Amino acid sequence: MSSTLSATTAAPLRKRSLVAFALIAVLAISGCSLSTSDADSAPASQAESGAFPVTIKHALGETTIKQEPKRVLVMDSESADTTLALGIVPTSISKQTWGGDEQGYFPWTRQAMDKLVAETPQTKQFYSESGDLNFEVILGEAPDIILAPYSGFSQEDYQRLSEIAPTLPYDNKPWQPSSWQAMTTSIGQALGRPARAAGLVAGAEAAMDQAKTSHPEFQGVSFLYGTYLREGETEAAIYGPADPRVKFIEALGLTVAPDVIAGAGKAEADSFSFGVSLEKLDTVDADIFLGWASEQSEVDYSLKNPLFSRWPVITGGKDLWITDKALSSATQRVSVLGIPWGLDVLVPQLSAVIGQS
């Protein structure tokens, strides 16, 4: 029997989530036991001594920040989460139209925001519906810095943004950051809080390690992560080992199925997924299948496909479908605030699917 994951499963584990979040906060405040007295004693809203000027290298060149930014514009949820975790409220925040609430906030982002300000700031649309940058909106915000490590704009757009304010774009490939740890580190450097950022990374990694340790049944379980079938499709899309969703599951102790590694090796270098013909799905083996979909109707459509439904991992009831948009975002747009929230919801459902006989 297929399992569908929703955020309603989080309530029984709220205490665990709060403990994980508290661990992240404690490590951030202490600078993860790093040296420099400023990192250990200064309040979270204060930059660390000697943090500026700083130059950060990235995929489009390098960015120099000469002094502490006061007006921080964040163009992605990862930047917003990290900025808030560092104790800074951005002056301009990108609206999350997919998975966010009516105001455009993810639940974990709003929780952090509510701890810092009495009234939640209005979010902004920095991208048009076609995906182009709204330069007029960005310029009107008069930022001192633009944080966009999860982005995909061109070199030309980067130059235009840099004329408005120092801009921190992606460090690897468009829409494919090297890791959430690297993003957190670079944002911490840009905002003058590198030691605190290191503490945030250590705290989030500790939360994931705790989840892994608490669930020894995850060890040795092979998995593949795919998506729902669209109408007329003749292939199933499978995410490769470099995809952040796959990395998130792997960090919990599960193992990427060998067939996934082999399939990804034959895909184009810049691709984060590859296709498998529905007629050959029975040649792809894994202990469990995680499927992404934006709503239950997409899951139902996929399971009605005669070839997909006969896939052994499906017939064996070892499939877990993630239809909650916020959870999908927490495990794809990974951040130090989203990790404990995502673990709270995902881990018990994952354990239940693995434990099915």
Image (spheres, grey):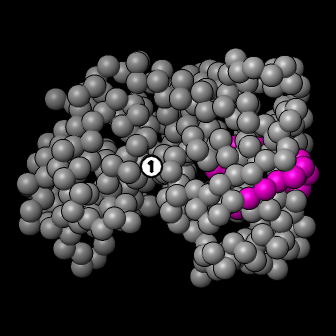
Q: Quadrant of the N terminus?
A: top left
Q: Position of residue 330 (x, y in %)?
A: 54, 46
Residue 112 falls in image quadrant: top right
Q: Position of residue 173 (x, y in %)?
A: 50, 63
- Say whether residue 5 is left or right of residue 153: left
Mark yes or no: residue 247 visible: yes
Query: Callout 1 environment at 10 Å: few (<14), some (14 to 19), or many (20+)?
Result: many
Q: Label 1 amino acid?
A: Pro
**Residue 310 lies within the magenta run:** no
- Say whether residue 64 is left or right of residue 212: right
Closer to the camera in the image, 62 or 305: 62
Closer to the camera in the image, 219 or 352: 219
Q: Position of residue 257 (x, y in %)?
A: 21, 43
Q: Is residue 2 above or below residue 58?
A: above
The residue that disc 1 covers is: 244
Residue at position x 71%, y 47% in the image: 187
Residue 264 falls in image quadrant: bottom left
Q: Position of residue 96 (x, y in %)?
A: 65, 61
SS at mark 1? helix
Residue at position x 84%, y 19% in the image: 37
Mark yes or no: residue 22 visible: no
Residue at position x 46%, y 24% in the image: 209
Q: Is residue 347 above or below residue 327?
A: above
**Residue 77 lies within the magenta run:** yes
Closer to the camera in the image, 277 or 324: 277
**Magenta segment boundaries in residue numbering:** 63-84
